[in-house]
Amino acid sequence: MSAKRTILVCCDTGCIASGSKAVVTALKEQLALAAAAGVAGAAATDATVEPLVKQTGCHGFCGYGPVVKVMPDDISYYRVKPKDAAAIIESLGGEPVERLLYRDDAGQRVTGREENPFYSSQKKLALRNVGELDPELLDDALSRGVYESLKKALTMTPEEIISQVERSGIRGRGGAGFPAGRKWRIAAGYNNNPKYVILNGDEGDPGAFMDRSMLEGDPHSVLEGVAICAVAVGATDAYLYIRDEYTTALRTMKQAILDAEAAGILGDSVLGSDKQLRVQVVRGGGAFVCGESSAMIASIEGAVGEPRAKYIRSTQEGLWGQPTVLNNVETFINIPLIIANGGDWYAQTGTDKSKGTKVFALVGKIKRSGLIEVPMGTTLREIIFDIGGGIPGNRRFKAIQTGGPSGGCLPDSLLDVPVDFDTLLEYGSMMGSGGMIVMDERTCMVETARYYVEFLARECCGKCVPCREGLRWLLDILTRICEGEGEFADLEILEGICETMTLASRCALGKTAANPVITTLRYFHDEYEEHITHKRCPAGVCRMGVAP
Amino acid sequence: MTVNLMIDGLACEAAPGQHVLDVARQNGVEIPTLCHHEALAGQACCRLCVVEIEEASGSRDVVVSCTYPAKEGLKVSTNSEQVRRLRRTVLTLLAERAPLAEGALPAYCQEYGVTGYDLRFTVDKDEKCILCGLCTKACAELGNSAIETTLRGVDKQVAPPFDEPPAACIGCASCAEVCPTGAIACEDADGVRTIWEKEFELLRCEACGKPFATAEELAWLKERLLDTELNLAYCPSCRGKMSLKDLT
Amino acid sequence: MILAQEKLTELLQAYPPERQHTLAVFQDIQKECGYLPKEHIVAAADYLKVPLSQAYAMATFYHTFSLTPRGKHVIKVCDGTACHIKDSKGVLQSLERLLGVGLGGTDADGLFTIETVACLGCCALAPAMQIGEEYYGNLTDEIIAEVIADYRRREAGEVVA
């Protein structure tokens, strides 16, 4: 029996920007033409095996989009233009279209993902369905086993669910890495109802799009994770807090909720059980600080997103003062896997204290950029050079920035450190939600620190003194240094302010806001000195007003 | 039920959940604050009341004492070198933000040896406001929610909606009363109060004849205190004397 | 553009009169009007039973909202880290030259407003921008000029039609 072919076209935001919608149209037109003429490759002469064109989520290799994959042959085409559609349709069942294949580092054309260096060392757990299904079709999700774990969870006791999540060792993917199982256990332990589940999809880090890709590419697995959490902790309402800028993600998630409710998966009876779960989408207001859990809660309640002052966890007193579990998109999307295969299975991947995989947005001055997923503990070198292919234009690697504005810039001497929660913290950066921005010799580290500080000065809530006034001073001093007006005494002031921000700020944003400055001072002190002593920017980025 | 904790080596008792700052003050240990007000607790904005703590479990941290709850076995250090260093930075930042602030801020600066700041970082040399948030909290809890902090980040400020004289303001002046730095202009002259660019007629107490409240404030109070026995024709001080008389 | 009373009432009554819907109501108003007109903030605060001072605080805290009218097409230049190190400043300057207006401004025809956004999430295509719901990546001066010219042609076409 000849298998039915599916042409998967990436229609994630990145590929859409590269023109993938026009490719979908062209492929469908060519299919219709070929069907009319009866010549669409060997397979399509039989009407029952007519190929299907599907719009999917992110295939990961965004830098080479639009990406098209032919299944089950596993042939991937890159930078596909509408004019290539005819050739693709014609080739079905025969030889692949040579010119659209990826050329590996040795110059060889590769057809499958396994042979492509960008994909070959990745491990897709969280992204298991992203790019493989049409996110707008519930049936597609069901055919890939989505909601089977929820079914299973409904046969388990809350204690059993939570203990599997604990055994998996999964830590929150939003940044700080708090163990998800422990969080659920605390919330489950309170008896005051109602309880709430919040999904943090307010991905505000500049240079990151992991959560967006999951929301857009596999909405039902995200919902499944949320629903399992609700069942485990005894919550009846869930709020999905998603950035307003993510128009596609918002549309996809809203549709997914409606479809799941119509199918009896969510709503008054979760899959026919006595559990109920109402899911609502809340559009974020464009405030990075709302990624902080208590600020997000304030925002959902209808107030400004200021983190609260009390030393109390939202698992105890969260939304409207009730026990609340707040996890990030990537945390939730992993949960169904843990329930299906067991916590011990999940814990086989990763390092001693950081289990599983992590999704990163690998971008910046890098040859192969895109969305990747690797086991925890993979080294920075493997990520940058094996997967990313190194720096374009024969330039030298200078730094990799992880953790967004709360993270830091790590130099080449640290390329061999394993990427996990604790190691990144140890070197002054952090996991954050997973942005990885590669910088080369033409990126100025002082200006990079200035960039993050400027971002945070705008984005912090402005409530507490160390963060608000500290950022104002940092920005002032760093701008001065970038303009060639810096003094050595300023570096001491920087350090004093960084210490105070780190220790005395009110929330996690403030406590980590100095990290871009601290790490660049620590690893790239010579660049600061060059700017101050010689009024010269080694990267050639800062314009000093004085000829170098 | 009480918990036992140590503050600077001094054994203290506290109600569980009572804030470390209050416990310290009850025991004669002074911790500097700018945004703390007993009636409007929990601001935790200025961060001047930072202290070092060691939990019974042995874990150490730096926290602000105005919101940190007292716990059994907690050890608090309110005046270590690190704490003083953090406070000096906070004071420096504030002094530069609000060079004309009155009251406790300049006094603390003197105490902590923060002098001769680097005026490079002053945005407005006439600024008095340190954004402690007491005024907006007082307005929400004691007044009519006329003012709020607006904008965010380094641009944050205290302002009425649309930066116009606020329609909701009843001229109670709670905001000006709680302001620790004299940043809110409020003037009573010739029976008229001027605040937030609005003018209010001041009513006189029927007993002592002193001006004591605006007409709007009394109307607002009347609306909320329908069942009250309070005679709003008299100022609080005369009311106090009268009820005392009634009692005796 | 200010909404007619009926339309505004309909928009407000899509939500229960509770504080938690403030963000959503504001977003809907901005979608209709392109910004948050003062009288609508006042009406929304009144409907949602939120003090005006707090409604205004929200309108100024969340950067999604604009309190002044904007052009027909809002151009959001991405200044995420990946875009920043790939010269998003150049994109901004290019647009400023083409439209004769600075960041935050609206061009003389009222067609375009230039804004920046923290990150659009298409970092692999840096530098990028968004106009309405369309995304544009790997921007160069030429591409930007072409995109703008295209919008202008379409607008001119609409006017003729």
Image (cartoon, coloured by chain):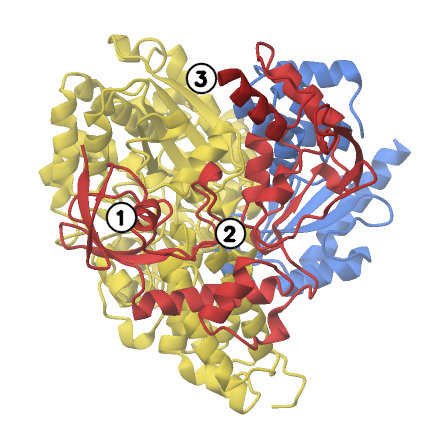
Disc 3 element:
helix
User: Disc number at residue A177?
Assistant: 1
Residue occupied by mark 3: A258
Pointers 1 and 2 in contact (CB under 8 A)? no
Q: Colour of chain A?
A: yellow
User: The chain coloured red carries which letter?
Assistant: B
Spatial separation of the CA atoms under disc 1 and disc 3: 32 Å
Task: Tell me the kind of residue under disc 3.
Answer: Leu
Same subunit: marks 1 and 2: yes
Task: Tell me the kind of residue under disc 1.
Answer: Gly
Task: Tell me the kind of residue under disc 2.
Answer: Cys
Spatial separation of the CA atoms under disc 1 and disc 2: 21 Å
Q: Position of residue B170 (x, y in %)?
A: 71, 30
Residue lying at 69% horizontally and 14% vertically, measured from the top left: C10
Closer to viewer: mark 3 or mark 2: 2
Q: Where on the picture, by quarter, is residue A314? A: top left
Residue situated furthest left in the rendering: A344
Whether residue B196 is visible here, answered yes or no, is yes
Q: Where on the picture, by quarter, is residue B208? A: top right
